[in-house]
Amino acid sequence: MPMITWQKGTKMSAVELLHNALQTPDGTILTSRHRHDYVTHKDANGKTYFTDGGLDYVRCSANGDEVHLCVWSDDDHEVIRERAEWGTYGKDGDKELRWVALKDMDTDHLKAVLELNVNPTHKACMQQELFLRGVEW
């Protein structure tokens, strides 16, 4: 099966991966959220599709008919806010893990996350989202 691989440490490493996903021809979206999170799907067309690597590396099928949905730190913020996600267990940390697109995060939630020790690239994206909303940070 043909595949594509990108990994930190290559000449592209100044640009950070914010979302690792692809869409198969039947509409299934495969998202890899952490290192070695190998996600696979046998499509209605009989081909197998996969993605792997979370935000550490991209290794994915290259059948030629999938749509790559990866988001990089140099993409427009409109793309970043639509696809980049944050995992949350809710305000009190007692809910089941769910993934929320940056654009769907509550303003107070964004501010609370920014108080944490967050990856500088993710922090900058969240600050840009607050700026877009007209919120001082």
Image (cartoon, rainbow, N blue to C red):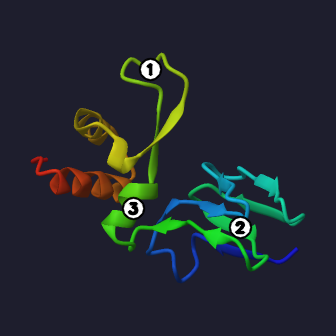
Find numbered disc 2 in the image and state the secondary structure of the residue it sits on.
strand
On residue 80, which mark appears? Answer: 3
> In the rendered view, would you say 95 is above or below 8?
above
**Where, quadrant-wise, is the N terminus in this rendering?**
bottom right
Q: Nearer the viewer, residue 104 or 32?
A: 104
Q: CA distance from mark 2 to mark 1?
A: 32 Å
Provide residue 54's location: percent of width, then percent of height: 61, 55
Residue type of the residue flagged with mark 1 = Gly
- Mark number displayed over residue 59: 2
Q: Which residue is mark 1?
A: 93
Q: Judging from the image, what secondary structure is the residue with disc 1 in?
A: loop
Mark 2 or mark 1: name the one nearer the start of the chain. 2
Q: Nearer the viewer, mark 1 or mark 3?
A: 3
Q: Position of residue 8 (x, y in %)?
A: 57, 69
Q: Nearer the viewer, mark 3 or mark 2?
A: 3
In the rendered image, the vertical position of residue 79 relative to residue 88, given as above or below: below
Q: Residues within 10 Å of mark 1 (few under 14, many from 20)?
A: few
| Circle 3: element type | helix
The alpha-carbon separation of the residues under discs 1 and 3 comes to 25 Å
- What residue is at 25 percent from the left and 54 percent from the top? 129
The part of the image, by quadrant, that contains residue 65 is bottom right
